[in-house]
């Protein structure tokens, strides 16, 4: 009888465990569904109804990465947006640059108070900068250690502006104006500067999600790079009571929620990356259409996912 009782208790325990596992999976699926709906709603807010352009969104939540894609990378060629489509990051590329600068600071190679001309000798005489090799340094010290093979600065080519290599150019979006008109060529470099390493950066959603993940401290990379990312996020210049500047990163207070972020925009691209300080929450929003309010869309999602109420607009609105 004792053995039968033990068998019954074991059977009941197994049934309860199975039931709990089923409920847990159902709750997780429901949670994922709510997240997907929230992201889709914000994605629609940055995609006009003409169905011309597209968007890509990455969410980092409690150690898990969620990727979402919408619309067209190139509507005339029937190319949909995928996690591996390359977007122009606009000014979001500055946080990659800032990571390299912070790494050099942590390694004692430069100081924030050092004169720039100490390192860029061309500036001593006021001349042009002709041989900047920043792009190669960025690749070796930041992109390669993170495994970001789909992120790069276009190299100077036959034309004034840089060009992506053919294999990456085939994956680049067609940029569109705010009116939905094709603007430029896929993978085109629109910068005014012809110095190596100073152009606009292209990257896939998947790569930028890895960069976001690393900045949240979710994965163990070599210590100097991790420390550099944390240094770059520290506010060093006070704008006002609720806003500070780090190394390219901007830090804002939204109703008690501290958001570390960077917005970028061009006439044919809109980009945003943001994190909730002290929480394992981050977001990337990329669109191949100019003048879309990805910043406030991203902030609304961050505030919602942080589980607190607060106005995600104000002093931190994108200008």
Image: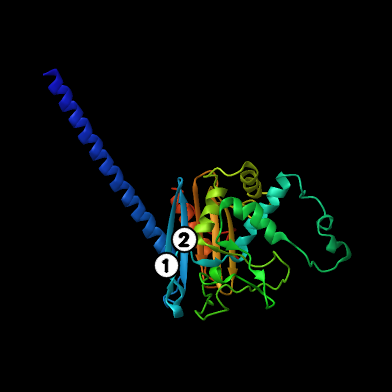
Label whose residue precedes the other's in the sequence (1 or 2): 2
Q: Which mark is residue 70?
A: 1
Question: Residue 59: percent from the left, percent from the top?
Answer: 46, 54
Q: Residue at x 55, y 48 (%)?
A: 214
Few, some or many residues within 10 Å of mark 2 (<14, 14–19, 20+): many
Q: How is the image coloured?
A: rainbow
Instruction: Classify 148 as above or below 167.
Output: above
Few, some or many residues within 10 Å of mark 1 (<14, 14–19, 20+): some
Residue 224 visible in the displayed image: yes
The front one of 153 and 191 is: 153
The front one of 31 and 13 is: 13
Q: Residue at x 72, y 71 (%)?
A: 194
Question: Residue 100: percent from the left, percent from the top?
Answer: 67, 53
Question: Residue 166: percent from the left, percent from the top?
Answer: 56, 72
The front one of 95 and 186 is: 186
Mark 1 vs 2: CB contact within 8 A: yes
Q: Residue at x 53, y 70 (%)?
A: 172
Q: Which mark is residue 57?
A: 2
Q: Quadrant of the C terminus?
A: bottom right
Instruction: Classify 299 as above or below 281.
Output: below
Residue 240 visible in the displayed image: no
Q: Which mark is residue 9?
A: none
Label 1 residue SS: strand
Label 2 residue SS: strand
Instruction: Classify 122 as above or below 175.
Output: above
Q: Residue at x 22, y 35 (%)?
A: 16
**What is the spatial separation of the Cα atoms under label 1 and label 2, in whole angstroms?**
9 Å
């Amino acid at each position: 009888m004792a053995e039968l009782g033990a068998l019954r208790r074991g059977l009941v325990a197994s049934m309860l465990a199975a039931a709990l596992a089923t409920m847990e999976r159902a709750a997780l699926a429901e949670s994922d569904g709510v997240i997907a709906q929230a992201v889709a709603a914000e994605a629609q807010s940055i995609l006009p109804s003409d169905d011309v352009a597209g968007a890509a969104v990455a969410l980092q939540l409690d150690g898990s990465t969620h990727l979402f894609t919408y619309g067209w990378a190139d509507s005339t060629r029937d190319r949909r947006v995928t996690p591996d489509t390359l977007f122009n990051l606009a000014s979001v590329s500055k946080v990659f640059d800032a990571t390299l600068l912070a790494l050099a600071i942590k390694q004692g190679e430069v100081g924030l108070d050092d004169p720039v001309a100490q390192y860029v000798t061309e500036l001593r005489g006021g001349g042009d900068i002709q041989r900047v090799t920043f792009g190669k340094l960025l690749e070796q010290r930041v992109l390669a250690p993170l495994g970001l093979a789909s992120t790069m600065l276009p190299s100077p080519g036959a034309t004034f502006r840089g060009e992506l290599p053919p294999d990456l150019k085939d994956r680049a979006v067609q940029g569109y104006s705010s009116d939905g008109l094709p603007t430029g060529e896929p993978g085109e470099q629109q910068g005014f500067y012809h110095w190596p390493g100073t152009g606009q950066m292209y990257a896939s959603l998947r790569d930028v999600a890895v960069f976001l993940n690393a900045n949240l401290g979710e994965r163990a990379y070599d210590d100097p790079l991790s420390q550099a990312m944390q240094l770059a996020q520290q506010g060093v210049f006070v704008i006002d009571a609720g806003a500070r500047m780090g190394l390219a990163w901007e830090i804002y207070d939204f109703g008690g929620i501290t958001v570390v972020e960077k917005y970028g925009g061009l006439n044919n691209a809109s980009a945003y990356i943001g994190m909730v300080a002290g929480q394992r929450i981050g977001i990337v929003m990329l669109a191949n259409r100019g003048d879309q309010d990805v910043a406030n869309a991203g902030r609304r999602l961050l505030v919602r996912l942080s589980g607190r109420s607060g106005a995600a607009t104000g002093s931190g609105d994108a200008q």
